[in-house]
Amino acid sequence: MSEKKFSKKHEWVLLDGDMATVGITKHATEMLGDIVFVEVPDAGKAVEKEGQAAVVESTKAASDVYSPISGEITEGNKAIADDPGSVNTDPEGASWFFKLKIKDKSEYDSLMSKDEYDKFCKENPS
Amino acid sequence: MEVQKTALYNYHKNLGAKFVPFAGYEMPIQYKDGIVKEHISTRSHAGFFDVSHMGQFFLEGDETLIESLEKIIPADLKNLKVNHSKYSFLLNNEGGIIDDLIITRTEKGFCIILNAACKENDIKQISQFLKKNHKHLLNNDLSLIALQGPKSVEILEKLIPGVANLKFMTGSNFEYEGENLYVTRSGYTGEDGFEISISNTKVEKLIDYLISNEVKPIGLGARDTLRLEAGLCLYGHDLNEKINPVEANLKWAIAKKRREVGGFNGWEKIKNLLANGSEKIRVGIKPDGKVIARENTKIFSSDNNEIGFVTSGTFGPSVNAPVAMGYVKSEFSEIGTSIQLEVRGKKYGGKISELPFYKKSYVK
């Protein structure tokens, strides 16, 4: 399993061979507040890097979740669709959003490391 | 226009509030606990809300003041007893709602609580009907604190003895810290509670007391989920100048006597609508699944005809499901009618639902 990488849109990616797991970051959940609705993509759906892939809604508003990497969805996490609040408790673990078979590993390589992402969040407070 | 702040602005900041611009004011949308926890703690214990951005508009005058106000407000002000309050509206010539409000009879006249975003215009509209000997004042030296939730009465009674005797939609003057304050038993959450009108100089002390009794600060976010579960309208969303009280399903707020006798703005139109019904009407909506139908979501009939739109929609923490309100063609307004809600291009099932979504527990 490779190092966890991060996007500027506050998603994380974990890579295992050519299979990636994607979720939203702890920082993202803190900005969103209480999550009350999640829509995850179905297996077989093609997603582009930075293309809309899922939806997350808090009590305040709906937000799109983007895929930080191109590929084909192999699984959406139905457990978080059934229990959206679990995204607040374990965003970077059990509450991943979707898995996909990636096309181009260089897209993964260009994402931020944990340190770079933490620095990015500090410099771009919302 | 410069952004305004309530007297409690710094207090909110110290409590960890996240602020948003709202009706020209910098107001807390939530505190550290977040919307869901704030909502639940209001329903299970008590919460306080700084609603000082709302207008506290005082009017004084002789008998002719009632005649003047009744031209724009369809409540029975003549028979409103001192210290009694009514929910009502300001109406335009077409019967459209300029603002919704709470009006209370005082010893010398009336006090009207106005929505923050509307208050300047409201005063202009009301003033058209006032006579030279009617005095009026928008009192910005006063804060307004809503204390809501089942423990409110126990907590406030300890500080201000006598408030427990107030019935829902009545008020009285009390003494606190050597000053007068006015307390009404009312609110906008579907819970028992009070609204406390208190001078800006004493309000922090009151909040200190509430916090020491584990009353949580509640932001606009939870205020919205609480009022929507209680089936209550938010002006600018569920109500506006193009919507009249019959369409808004608020005809109960037009006094019976006034419906018959009239003499207020838009009466001809409203009389006709009361007799024949309106084309569209406000309803409660419950999506079947978890999807949230937010404001402006289009509503379709089960055979795919567009029949209306959502005006407020969120997740209801106490109902533990999404809830919404909106307007549909009247023939689709029956409770239980199946509808479809178009969210992000997809249609989801839902039903017309009874209001409120959450049962009230007012003290009558």
Image (cartoon, grey):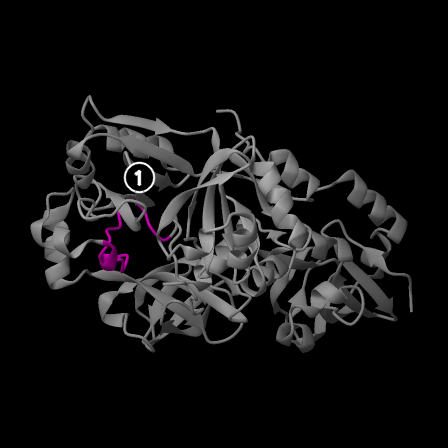
- Residue at the (39%, 50%) spot, across then down: B237
Relative placement, left or right, of B101 versus A21 is: left
Residue A68 image offset from top left, x and y in percent? 74, 57
Nearest to the observer: residue B45 or residue B222: B45
**Residue beneath disc 1:** B106
Query: Residue B93: x percent and y percent?
Result: 17, 40
Q: Residue at x 40, y 54 (%)?
A: B166
- At x 13%, y 47%, the residue is B267
**Mostly what secondary structure, the magenta segment?**
loop
Secondary structure at numbered mark 1: loop
Q: Amino acid at mark 1?
A: Thr
- Seen in the picture, residue B345 relative to B82 is either above or below; the reply is below
The front one of A57 and B281 is B281
Magenta-colored stretch includes residue B248: yes
> Residue B317: x percent and y percent?
55, 66
Which portion, as a residue range, is magenta?
B238-253
Tell me, yes or no, if residue A55 can be seen here: no
> With respect to residue B314, does A86 lie above or below?
below
Q: Is residue B224 left or right of residue A100?
A: left
Query: Between residues B275 and B360, which one lies in front from this camera angle?
Result: B360
Look at the image and tell me in which quarter the C terminus of chain A lies.
top right
Q: Is residue B355 left or right of residue B346?
A: left
Q: Give the total of numbered labels.
A: 1
Q: Chain of mark 1?
A: B
Q: Is residue B43 visible?
A: yes
Residue B206 at x, y = what percent?
Answer: 58, 42
Disc 1 residue crowd, few under 14, some 14–19, many 20+, Cα 10 Å: many
Work out whether residue B37 or residue B117 is closer to the camera in this orientation and state it: B37
Q: Residue at x 47, y 61 (%)?
A: B191
* Magenta highlight on residue B122: no
Please state, as top left, top right, bottom left or bottom right, where the N terminus of chain A lies in the image.
bottom right
